């Protein structure tokens, strides 16, 4: 790919909107994410460019993990925007789970536009060594 092609807007970059998630800013966009698993926990990494901690709401319970986020765009003083491809639409991600999480031990960190969530498994799901007599 030539350097010139990286500056051509691609229609495939347009966010896919959820039909049932709307508010005053328009339909919510599902952020890109990665879900991993270890014997002890699940790990969720979500790309949230431009989102601050104040613009983030993360809840776990009732069989779902729900993330709602909004990036706060402010026009810098003395600047005139000529082109902008970062829309002011909310992000929303809802993942169903089987209530086998230790919800009281969930930890999350937002750094440099990346949210990392550690979702420990409930004790009943963790592998156990069985002593044989």
Image (cartoon, rainbow, N blue to C red):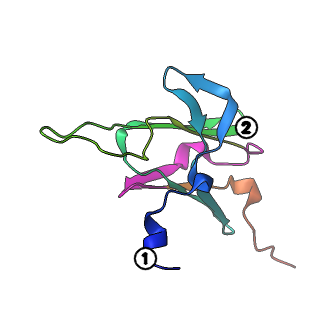
Between 12 and 32, the one nearer to me in the picture: 12
Between 69 and 110, the one nearer to me in the picture: 69
The number of numbered discs placed on residues in the rendered structure image is 2
Extent of the magenta region: 96-115
Instruction: Tell me what residue is drawn at x 40 percent, y 52 percent.
Output: 110
Q: Quick check: is 101 in the magenta stretch?
A: yes
Asked if 50 appears above or below 126 in the picture, the reply is above
Asked if 75 appears above or below 4 in the picture, the reply is above
Residue 43 in percent (x, y) is at: 59, 61
Residue 22 in percent (x, y) is at: 60, 24
Residue 53 in percent (x, y) is at: 36, 42
Residue 95 in percent (x, y) is at: 69, 44
Neighbor class of circle 2 (other Cα within 10 Å; few <14, some 14-19, many 20+) is few
Residue bearing mark 1: 3
Q: Is residue 127 left or right of residue 30?
A: right
Q: Secondary structure at mark 2?
A: loop
């Amino acid at each position: 790919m030539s350097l010139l092609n990286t500056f051509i807007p691609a229609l495939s970059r347009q966010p896919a909107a959820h039909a049932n998630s709307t508010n005053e800013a328009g339909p919510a966009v599902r952020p890109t994410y990665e879900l991993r698993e270890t014997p002890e926990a699940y790990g969720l990494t979500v790309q949230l460019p431009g989102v601050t901690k104040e613009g983030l709401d993360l809840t776990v319970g009732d069989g779902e993990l729900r993330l709602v986020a909004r990036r706060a765009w402010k026009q810098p003083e003395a600047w005139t925007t000529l082109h902008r491809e970062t829309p002011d639409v909310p992000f929303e991600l809802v993942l169903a789970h089987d209530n086998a999480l230790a919800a009281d031990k969930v930890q999350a960190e937002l750094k440099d536009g990346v949210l990392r969530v550690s979702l420990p498994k409930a004790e009943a799901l963790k592998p156990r060594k069985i002593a044989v007599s």
